[in-house]
Image (tube, rainbow, N blue to C red):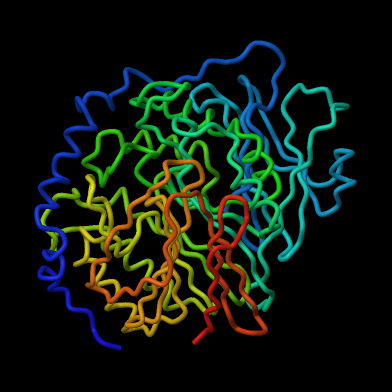
Amino acid sequence: MDSHSTDNSTNRRRFLAGGAAIAGTVTASVLGSPAVAAESGPAQSTADSGPLRLTHGVVTGDVTSTSAMVWARGSREGSMHVLYGSDETQVAVQKGLQSETVTLTAERDFIGQVTLPDLEPGTRYFYMVRLEGENTTVRRPIATFVTAPEKDDKSDVHFVWSGDTGSGFQNPTPYPTFASMLAENPEFFIFNGDTIYGDVATAASGRATSREMYWAKYKEMREDPYLQTLASRVPFIVNWDDHEVTNGFRGPSEPLMPIGREAFHDYWPISSGPEQIYRSIRWGRELEVFVVDGRQYASPLDAPDGPDKILFGAEQRKWLVDSMRRSKATWKVIVTSSPISIIRSAPPVDDYVAYEHEFGLLMDEFQKIKAKNVVWLTADVHWAQAIEYPRYGMWEFVGCPIGSSQRTKAEPLSPTFGPEERFLALNGRYYGSVSISSRKKTMTVDLKRQSGESIYSVEIPAR
């Protein structure tokens, strides 16, 4: 395979003349005063009156072959634990295993997250969240998930992905996409960014400028009954994009980033820690999922592209390359919220095209380690698209939005990495569905309407 040239200024200039100048106006227009990120004291949530109760369902996150994280929220101060096991009847009568007990506090919006350890691979588990002081005769709905197979298990894999909910500011919930994805009975769902629109005024609050306001946006989105049902039956792998903070944000120069990141970790069970988002999850012999963070480490969008402009940053890029080198999985799926080659003409020109130098370094490293069967799953642009990169033997698929605005205008592709468009669907809401056959050594990717109707399908053989 040909080596990528990091001197890509000619290709980029062909499409982006004046783009940096346009993008440079974005930060000033959306931030307002830098003081908006400053808080006078610790974040506090207001307790509801009455008995302690669950308020927004449950979420299972970052399930592995031996562990799972469980998220829940109470109505006021108290404590919670999880009853769980592989026997649904035992869980229903409140017997079986019990997790650690965690305290629900106003400082964290009465949220509890616990890890269920020492699980058996490839096993269906059932669980019930219990809150302190509840009447134990009350039958609580039982949630479920399946753990990942062991690393050498050659089981087939089926999962779904999408992003860009909209938080009700453009389209009322419930969102049919969540119900359609659940009907497929996937092993997990990849929620690929813009899980809220924190920077847009909604019924919950105005544009978020505090941790409490971000919390309000998450609670608003979690009222969707289809989402609650999906989250109780299917584990989530969650990434973030810009609207978890503010439109088009990149990097630590954004004053709202720290509190937006805190709220994101508050409301999603993520195994990588309180600040880090990038991580990988292995799913048997056939698949490893790599979630990458193209937001919090990035240089300002309007900085000149070149050696000093950062997208992932050296540490994350080294982690990704080293992890890809070590991975024995047949398929390597990279989850990134923004597309690789799509050039958006309307500001903000907010995509990886503005960071092609560093992305080129990553492609060079992939070629050096002979990375095979690499598939990128993206969202953010509000349409469905399939793009092949023959030079690198990889594919990119876009599947969204769940609830946000529908786009009616196609955008060009930067030629730098040799993309070839195979499919594009506009003016609709979409999601993606992936099925991996261990016997055939293939990955089949379907792009679907929110109704579940397939509009494009491709079977990719493993190399």
Total tally of numbered discs in the picture? 0
At x 25%, y 46%, the residue is 251
Dividing the picture into quadrants, the one containing residue 210 is: top left
Residue 152 locus on image (x, y percent): 64, 78
Q: Quadrant of the N terminus?
A: bottom left
Q: In this view, does 278 lie above or below 115?
A: below
Q: Is residue 168 above or below residue 192?
A: above
Residue 334 locus on image (x, y percent): 44, 65
Most foreground residue, 322 or 438: 438
Which residue occupies the extreme top position in the image? 49
At x 65%, y 23%, the residue is 78
Most foreground residue, 294 or 64: 294
- Determine whether, in the image, residue 48 is placed left or right of residue 342: right
Residue 31 locus on image (x, y percent): 23, 31
- Determine whether, in the image, residue 355 is placed left or right of residue 288: left
Residue 322 locus on image (x, y percent): 39, 73
Q: In this view, does 323 lie above or below 57?
A: below
Q: Is residue 309 above or below residue 57?
A: below
At x 45%, y 30%, the residue is 169
Dividing the picture into quadrants, the one containing residue 50 is: top right
- Determine whether, in the image, residue 107 is placed left or right of residue 211: right
